[in-house]
Amino acid sequence: MSEDALPELSIELTPTVVVSTALATMDFTPVHHDTQLARAQGSKDIFLNILTTMGLVERYVTDWAGPGAVIRSINVKLGVPAYAGDRLSFNGTVVSREGGRIAVEVRGKVSLGDHATGTVTLTLEGE
């Protein structure tokens, strides 16, 4: 964990991924699992829900930081939808290390642009 740039994480947003993660977070809103209804409401397709996006942001940072990572805060702004059939790619950079706290700027992009941008602050237990 010595480098300031985190490695990219890229996730194929298959319909199965979008539907299963919505159901796993108990989000039964039809735009996350019913393509016809999502399109009838003006969406291109079904899309990731907020809880899934936040979980993926956290996963991205904790996979990099290791098992001692303890998330202290997450401040994320949502952007364009992450539709089924697209790819979600995360990049990140360590922007500060102060008093045992590490701040990481994170960007999750899809073909339409930024899906999620923000900062995750964490500490490392045992260090």
Image (cartoon, grey):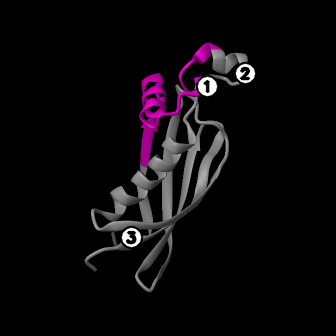
> Which residue sits at x=56%, y=54%?
107
Are circles 2 and 1 on residues that touch, CB within 8 Å? yes
Q: Are the residues at dot 2 and dot 3 in contact (C-beta closer than 8 Å)?
A: no
Q: Report the span colored magenta.
A: 9-36
Write the residue at 68% across / 18% down: 39
**What amino acid is found at the position of numbered circle 2 in the picture?**
Gln
Amino acid identity at mark 3:
Glu
Q: In what quadrant of the picture does the N terminus appear? A: bottom left
Residue on which disc 3 sits: 3
Q: How many marks?
A: 3
Where residue 9 appears, x then y in whole percent?
A: 42, 48
111 relative to 72, above or below: above
Q: Which residue does the image show at 39% across and 70% down from the upper left?
A: 3
85 lies above or below 74: above
N-terminal of the pair, mark 1 or mark 3, is: 3
**Is residue 108 in view from this perspective?**
yes
Tell me the distance, in whole angstroms, between the alpha carbons under discs 1 and 3: 39 Å
Closest to the camera, between mark 2 and mark 3, is 2
**Would you name the residue on which mark 2 appears?**
41
Position in image of residue 40 (x %, y %): 71, 16
The residue tagged 1 is 31
- How much space separates mark 2 and mark 1, taking CA atoms? 8 Å
Question: Does the magenta-highlighted stretch encompass residue 68?
Answer: no
